[in-house]
Amino acid sequence: MNPLRLFISSVQKELAEERAALRDYLQGDALLRRFFEVFLFEDVPAADRRADACYLDEVQRCDIYLGIFGDEYGWEDAAGLSPTHREFRKATELGKTRLIYVKGNDDTHRHSKMKALVIEAGAELIRRRINSAQELIAAVYASLIKLLEERELIRFTPFDASFCRNATLEDLDMEGVSRFLVLARRGRSFPLPEDTPSEDVLAHLNLLDKGRPTHAAILLFGKKPQRFLITSEVRCAHFHGFEVEKPIPSYQVYKGTLFELIQQAKDFVLSKIDLWTGDRSQGVQVPTAYEIPQEVVAEAIVNAICHRDYTSNASVQVMLFKDRLEIWNPGSMPPGLTLEKLKQPHHSVPANPLIAEPLYLTKNIERMGTGIRDMIQRCRQAGLPEPIIHLDAGEWVTTIRRKPGVFLTSPQSGAQSGAQSGAQSIEVLKILAVENEISANILAEKLGLQSKTGAFKRTLQDLLKQQQIEYTLPDKPSSRLQKYRLTAKGNAILKQLNQENL
């Protein structure tokens, strides 16, 4: 957005101090200098140009005319009008926004023509009396803030509740709203019927501002949310070591709605961590357990995406290291809460309440302030240390430790060992001991997997590197006819493990 041009009127010497002080303040204020470009006639360099033509041209170019009227009237032209009078009438003729400030409460010593100008201005708009440069600055500040608010250039409502500039209803995925409605009715008994028009659903959720999409609406249901909110993306990285190092083995930048971001980031982590897979000895369903409970992964990611500060230029970062999972998101502590209180029963204080509501209705979050306590409890049950949560330079950092070893038996026993890369590796060896040769697709099916996950592929690669399994077509590793078989080393390890379990 181009800054608004602010023309400060009056060239009377008596007001030179006020004019300079106001200019310096507006140019130095961190907020106002973003929105206003100040024109002061005294700042114009010498030029072969008539002064009256210059200031009238500037009035025509400006967005806001700011007049300061004192006691003096000033130099008069052939028609008997001063530059200030000409400027005011020109601004009025052009329909410019006018802000008028009159110095002094006593008009006794005011020039007769200046009195007439003050009366002329007062008949058309509200004037403000000031007595010093400090009063002028305070009065102008209040007027400009009000103007910015009226023009919707600044907001005093929560970010998620304010309208998304340049966005229209055409930028929303109304089919996505319909899908949400079905899930919300099933998950939380949402009161609106399934045939409710999408616009009515959005209005019910307070996601429209005067018929325009709010930031929350774009983030939740936008066709391309990152077109309007670039940093709402989620960045995921997987490092084989303990620190951030290049080259990064696996790096993804996910875009989409908040619902999509949550699922994508969660799948990224779950595809990289170890998965224990049991057998059907306890029932028809094959038991599985991730080294970090998937509920903990989901809770940490949802918290970051739901409660982050969307006005920040930073994005949510999900980083998986050899020993831990770290999730970074921009934000600050909710009022009245401390890090210690977050671990205890407390009221839910969402940073983005209009975003939190649809996530609650689709069962992505609860609204009882129990998320962090649930994470702590589930980590303890899985034999993991308590998650560490701290603030670092305006960002929330959630650290979840990974298991130092791997699953080798049932998740209930908690027995661990470094002799193998994971329980899934043991199951692969067992299957190959029976099947002799088998393709990857059939092997995944026998493990109870619906597809070849990232963790499954990594398990095969690890076993190949350790020479516990081998290709049946070693010269054609990508062949569609490729299969796997047990090596002598793999058979020996399997026998050793069987003896240890006797």
Image (cartoon, grey):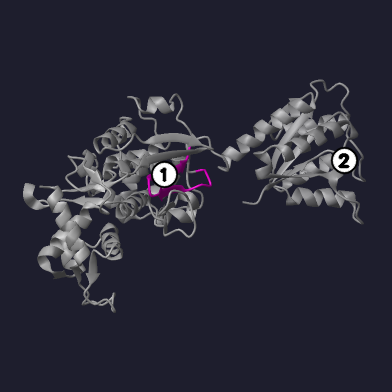
| Location of residue 457 in the rendering, given as x and y in whole percent from the top left corner | 27, 62
Q: Which mark is residue 264?
A: none
**On the rendered structure, is 255 left or right of 198?**
right
**On the rendered structure, is 81 left or right of 178?**
right
Tag 2: Cα neighbours inside 10 Å, few (<14), some, or many (≥20)? some
Q: Nearer the viewer, residue 204 or 324?
A: 324
323 in magenta: yes
Q: Nearer the viewer, residue 154 or 80?
A: 154
| Location of residue 487 in the rendering, given as x and y in whole percent from the top left corner | 20, 67
Q: Quadrant of residue 264?
A: bottom left
How many angstroms separate mark 2 from mark 1 (CA)?
A: 65 Å
Q: Amino acid at mark 1?
A: Ile
Residue most toward the bottom?
Answer: 475
Q: Residue at x 32, y 45 (%)?
A: 200
Q: Residue at x 29, y 79 (%)?
A: 475
Tell me the magenta residue range.
Answer: 311-331
Q: Nearer the viewer, residue 481 or 363?
A: 481
**On the rendered structure, is 10 left or right of 150?**
right
Q: Quadrant of residue 224?
A: bottom left
Q: How many marks?
A: 2
Query: Residue under circle 1?
Result: 327
173 in magenta: no
- Of circles 2 and 1, the one toward us is 1
Q: Residue at x 90, y 55 (%)?
A: 49
The vertical placement of 227 against 437, above or below, is: above
Query: Residue under circle 2?
Result: 82
Q: Amino acid at mark 2?
A: Ser
The vertical placement of 191 against 244, above or below, is: above
The vertical placement of 56 against 461, above or below, is: above
Q: Quadrant of residue 70?
A: top right
